[in-house]
Amino acid sequence: MSSSDKIVLVNDERFRQELSKYTEKAEEYFILADTNTTKHCFPVVMSAAPGIDPGRLITVDAGEEGKNISTLHHIWSTLLHDGAGKNTLLLNLGGGMISDIGGFAAATYKRGIPYLNIPTSLLGMVDAAIGGKTAINIGGIKNQAGTFWRAEAVIIYPPFLASLDEDELLSGKAEMLKTAIVADRPLFDELSVMKQDIPSGDMIKRTAMIKNNIVMQDLYDRAERQCLNYGHSIGHALEALCQLRGKAVKHGLAVAAGILCEAYIATKMNILQDPAFRIIEKYINATFPPLHLMKEDIKDMLLLVGHDKKNYGGAIRMSLPSGLGKCTFGIAVEDTLISESLEYYATCQPSP
Ligand SMILES: NC(=O)c1ccc[n+]([C@@H]2O[C@H](COP(=O)([O-])OP(=O)(O)OC[C@H]3O[C@@H](n4cnc5c(N)ncnc54)[C@H](O)[C@@H]3O)[C@@H](O)[C@H]2O)c1
């Protein structure tokens, strides 16, 4: 079992203390943000830690399209040009795009520098910032190059969520739902009755800790951690398909669709009982907007699902729920069943 990420849920005062602790200790630091988090979150950081030097801010374009080799190259070159050394600390201030690419930059710059994740999206707080998986996309295909490189700490400051738009909050909720379905029935029950758009700090931390516990059992994603990929074999393919067609969708919204299709597959394979499937189906249909998928898209979707990193032995492998709060992984799934699940999704969803 590996050690756990240091995850701290902070209020205003503690945020100040944690920021100063890391920036004062570091020989040098840089802050990586995207255009949105530079606008909405960097001023919050500046007021919490007035000593922060705005000259140390590296801003990249916001959005998944920027999670690529040219942005990574830009981050490396800026660090090099501005004299970052082996002990420079990188502060990733943003959602999952920033923690993925910033983590990868930190893992590879001078063969590895320390970094801190300060997630600003719900998805980042409950999922992406935790567990040391870093990545960039190649040719629009998700997370094809990356490393495992763990953050010094993950600082969760929920007030950042005030500037996040509704779709982004929903996107984070999809990852909370995934974590609940694969590992924690009580969390699922709480999510099902949650009325407010922004979950409480306690619920955010609890979801983050569930992920953290799974990561501790299997840092390198060889076994149990694969459960966290539930919904992502089809979700990533949908995200890539939409992006390739110039109609990008939020990661979590694609994952919500993936959760439903993969629950369908689990039920057809007698891994998940029909009543549990119906509960998931009802929750997803009531909570997430439908994505537009046509029957003609299914061939391309199968090709994209084929790129998934969990595949091996010539088969498409999925992590599938075996109940609410339970999961299996490494399950070989036939192309025909994947097509059937996509057809089910394409026909059962109302037109957006
Ligand atoms: N490494 C992992 O374990 C892991 C797990 C899940 C997802 N991911 C990755 O995370 C990414 C998705 O994360 P995301 O949804 O956070 O994407 P994101 O980082 O692109 O953020 C979504 C949008 O919200 C904006 N934003 C973020 N915080 C904001 C704030 N406080 N106020 C206003 N705007 C804000 C961003 O600028 C962006 O436009 C994907 O690349 C996915 O592959 C990684």
Image (cartoon, rainbow, N blue to C red):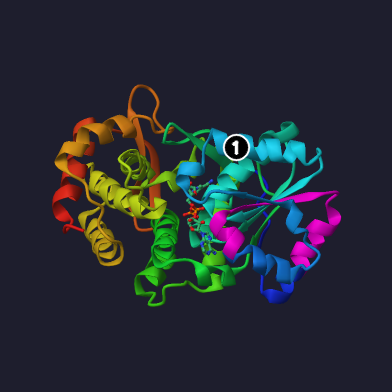
Dot 1 alpha-carbon crowd within 10 angstroms: few under 14, some 14 to 19, many 20 or more: many
Q: Which secondary structure class fits the magenta region best?
A: helix
Q: Position of residue 291 (x, y in %)?
A: 26, 53
237 left or right, relative to 273:
right
Q: Is residue 144 above or below residue 224?
A: above
Q: Is residue 337 left or right of residue 215?
A: left
* Magenta residues, start to end: 17-39
Indicate whether residue 20 is drawn in magenta.
Answer: yes
Residue 10 against residue 182 in the figure, above or below: below
Q: Which residue sits furthest top?
A: 314
Q: Nearer the viewer, residue 35 or 268?
A: 35
User: Can residue 219 be spotted in the picture?
Assistant: yes
Does any portion of residue 1 appear in the rendered image?
no
On the image, the x and y values in percent for residue 225 come to 50, 44
Residue 289 is drawn in which quadrant?
Answer: bottom left
Quarter in which the C terminus is drawn: bottom left
Q: Residue at x 65, y 52 (%)?
A: 5
Q: Position of residue 263 (x, y in %)?
A: 28, 50
Determine which residue is flagged by label 1: 72
Q: Is residue 225 magenta?
A: no
Left or right side of 78 for 259: left
- Quadrant in the picture for the N terminus: top right
User: Hey, which quadrant is residue 294 in on the image?
Assistant: top left
**Residue drawn at point x = 76 percent, y = 67 percent:** 49
Secondary structure found at label 1: helix
Q: Please tell me whether residue 154 is drawn above or below residue 346 in the rendered image.
A: below
Quarter of the image holding residue 36?
bottom right
Ligand 1: does it lie within 8 Å of the C-beta at label 1? no
Kindly identify the amino acid type of the residue bearing the numbered disc 1.
Leu
